[in-house]
Image (spheres, grey):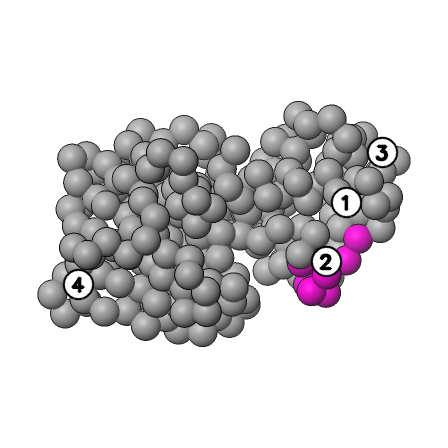
Amino acid sequence: MGRRTRFESHTETHVASAPMSEPARIDVEPDPVPIVLILATTLRRAARTPQLAAAIGRINGNVALRSTVDPQAATMRFGGGGVTVVRGVSEDADVVIAADLNKLADEKPPKPKVTGIPRHPKLAMTVSKLLDPPHGTWQEEAQRFFAFATKHPGVPRSMRVVCTDDGSELTLGNVPSEYELHGSEHALLNVFLGNSVIGQDLLDGKIFAVGKLAHLAELTGRSLAWMLGE
């Protein structure tokens, strides 16, 4: 998810991305809070994979996710061929995942505490896959994010992205580049998948940038919108 949740890693890297048009029904409560929007965005990303889309429409039960460090919490209510995400931990939650949501996007995130697995093992394992869906390469995800971001005025029309792990790079838009982002494969994927926000990752030293502050502000706004599923 925005801050990824997993019991163990099921992510398949280097999976070609498909358009964000899920066949499964994914709804949110009226006037949703950020964690609800982030969860719904993650579920929609999962629904780009046909098997996971089918799982969303097939399973029944309620799974809650709550933060161990702040009041953030939401419940995914599966049934009737889809899922509705609402705020808080519902009293009838079958499975509850408790974790530090701020660290779930780390390369080695702390293992969450999960209750309800003995009574609902299939539900728990299916949702673990939904919350850690397959994704493309960092280059593929960068192209998807950039196509979204450049619809907004003020975003740089071109950007050079460099992976510090192996020196591979990608230029988005036309040269010369107006902005540059540098980071590890893990850090770049987090940003382009919407698991983290560009401005925050820059402050935390997870990625590095070269360019105008105005461009950073616009990219940060688009990054947050990407995370929230705008």
Task: Give the labeled residue for mark 4.
Answer: 121
Task: Give the labeled residue for mark 3.
Answer: 175
Q: In this orientation, which residue lies closer to the viewer: 129 or 101?
A: 101
Q: Residue placed at 43% from the left, 44% from the top? A: 33
Range shown magenta: 201-209
Q: Residues within 10 Å of mark 3 (few under 14, many from 20)?
A: few
Amino acid type for the residue under numbered disc 2 = Leu
- Select label 1 or label 4 by which is in front: 1
Q: Are marks 1 and 2 in contact (CB under 8 Å)?
A: yes
Q: Residues within 10 Å of mark 1 (few under 14, many from 20)?
A: many
- Select label 1 or label 3 by which is in front: 1
Among the two numbered marks 4 and 3 on one chain, the one whose residue lies closer to the N terminus: 4
Among the two numbered marks 3 and 2 on one chain, the one whose residue lies closer to the N terminus: 3
Q: Residues within 10 Å of mark 4 (few under 14, many from 20)?
A: few
Q: Work out how far the residue at label 4 is from the one at label 3, CA to CA, in angstroms.
A: 51 Å
Q: Are marks 4 and 2 in contact (CB under 8 Å)?
A: no
Asked if residue 123 is among those painted magenta in the image, a careful observer would answer no
Identify the image quadrant of residue 36. top left
Q: Secondary structure at mark 2?
A: helix
> Is 159 on the left or on the right of 112, as rendered?
right
User: Is any part of residue 106 visible from this angle?
Assistant: yes
- Select label 4 or label 3 by which is in front: 4
Amino acid type for the residue under numbered disc 1 = Leu
